[in-house]
Image: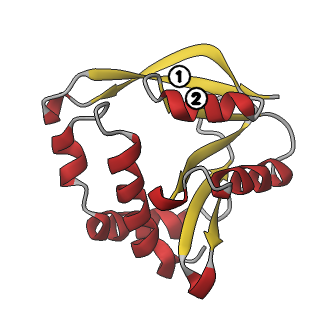
């Protein structure tokens, strides 16, 4: 992935969130997602993080963006594992193997354990990660949607040894 890909990756992210988190994350939050603003906001971070974060794209015919994975060194205090920060398939490609192929590539590139955070209520994603060898290790953190009229949700930390 290059910085020039950020606009289309953020569009894919917003589309994936709208489908994956419908009924879980407040609709007002999902409706307010602005991929163009997200791409602009992430540009500096993208440039500054290349020594510790890698982004992979799954591309189809005509360079169509089918999926995106972001992984790298763990956040401070997160332990020795590498971390999967994001994994999204375009909604029309969920269940086609795109996410699996991206995750397999992340595993091939990271030596040692891998951790990730997933919303507790996102049962489809949790099943996907569990089938991939991840287990919930008991740590929770809040994901607060109060400003959008929603609840504080829990994220669970999953680890794959």
Question: Relative to 157, is 17 on the left or the right?
Answer: left
Q: Which residue in the protein does label 2 denote?
A: 126
Q: Are marks 1 and 2 in contact (CB under 8 Å)?
A: yes
**Foreground residue, 86 or 26?**
26
Q: Residue at x 65, y 58 (%)?
A: 98
Please tell me the numbered disc located at residue 107.
Answer: none
Q: Does dot 2 land on a helix, a strand or a loop?
A: helix
Going from N to C along the chain, the mark reached first, 1 or 2, is: 2
* Quarter of the figure with residue 54: bottom right
Residue 100, above or below 62: above
Residue 79 at least partly seen? no
Q: CA distance from mark 1 to mark 2?
A: 9 Å
Does residue 57 appear to the left or right of 121 in the view shown?
right
Q: Secondary structure at mark 1?
A: strand
Q: Which residue is mark 1?
A: 156
Residue at (46%, 56%) from the top-left corner? 91
Residue 36 place in picture, x, y as percent: 29, 71
Closer to the eye: label 1 or 2: 2
């Amino acid at each position: 992935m290059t910085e020039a890909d950020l606009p289309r990756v953020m569009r894919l992210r917003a589309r994936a969130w709208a489908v994956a988190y419908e009924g879980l994350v407040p609709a007002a939050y999902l409706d307010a997602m602005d991929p163009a603003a997200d791409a602009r906001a992430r540009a500096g971070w993208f440039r500054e993080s290349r020594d510790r974060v890698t982004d992979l794209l799954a591309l189809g015919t005509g360079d169509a963006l089918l999926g995106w994975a972001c992984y790298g060194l763990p956040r401070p205090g997160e332990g020795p594992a590498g971390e999967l920060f994001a994994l999204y398939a375009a909604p029309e490609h969920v269940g086609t193997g795109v996410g699996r192929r991206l995750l397999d590539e992340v595993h091939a590139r990271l030596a040692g354990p891998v951790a990730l955070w997933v919303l507790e209520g996102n049962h489809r994603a949790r099943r996907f990660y569990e089938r991939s060898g991840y287990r919930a290790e008991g740590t929770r953190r809040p994901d607060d949607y109060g400003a959008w009229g929603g609840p504080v949700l829990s994220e669970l930390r999953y680890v794959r040894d």
